Image (tube, rainbow, N blue to C red):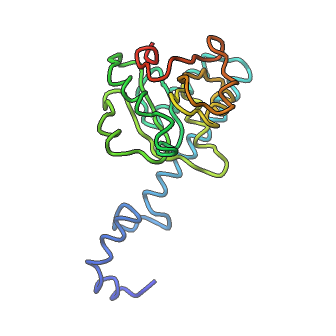
Amino acid sequence: LGCPECYQTFADGLSGLFKSMHKGTRHVGKAPEALRKSREVGDRLKLLQKKLNKAIETEDFETAALLRDEIKAELGIPFEKVVLFVGRLGVGGGRKRVDHVVEVFRRIHNPSWGLVIVGSGMTGEIRERMNPENTRYLGEIHDPGERAISRVFRMADLFCIPGHVGLGINQAFYWGLPVVTEEGRQPPEVHYLVDGRNGFIVPEGDLESLQD
């Protein structure tokens, strides 16, 4: 790991590296402070997930609602009701049409409702169109056990991919979320959606209907 003289000699070069890797330059133990805090948050979310699952299984819906609020707080989501978009934003030339739901939330001024976007491929153009008051972009979420993305689905109230729904519709239905999408070139999975029963299908490109 080097001697004390090495650290002193190369301090200028190492300082930026340590800040980038460990979010600091002060030694606070075997684990970097940023990693320790990240693990603590992860552990709290796992515990909340277990409690939420138990509350739902026992039909203790009041407790379940409180736990969903705690998950939102851990993820930094301030909205009472959450519309969720999960998918690779840039795939197929933007065929999932995240731009449509982003535009809808530019028109919504109800502070209780918010849009949460998860997935890779966010463009600068779409990011600039996002309404900072009611839209949050969490980036790409991936873990082998899918625990993290499961928590995101758990705290949502509605799932919306205006364009090509892909396998996201299966995840939404698994977690009991209604799905809203548009007509158009959709994959076979869209047939799981029964308009008016477990979600809604609106005319393609009709943002007013999508907002309603």
Residue at image x 50%, y 33%? 85
Q: Position of residue 126 (x, y in %)?
A: 35, 38
Residue at image x 63%, y 31%? 169
Q: Which residue is the extreme one toward the front?
A: 185
Vertical arrangement, residue 161 with respect to residue 7, above or below:
above
Residue at image x 37%, y 60%? 23
Q: Position of residue 25 (x, y in %)?
A: 34, 67
- Does residue 157 appear anywhere in the picture? no
Vertical arrangement, residue 205 with respect to residue 18, above or below:
above
Task: Please identify the quarter of the rendering in which residue 181 is found.
Answer: top right
Q: Is residue 66 left or right of residue 211?
A: right
Vertical arrangement, residue 119 with respect to residue 144, above or below:
above
Q: Which residue is the extreme one toward the left?
A: 12
Task: Please identify the quarter of the rendering in which residue 102 is found.
Answer: top left
The C terminus: image quadrant:
top left
Residue at image x 55%, y 29%? 155
Q: Residue 80 versus residue 63: which sits nearer the camera?
A: 80
Q: Position of residue 132 (x, y in %)?
A: 31, 32
Q: Position of residue 197 (x, y in %)?
A: 66, 12
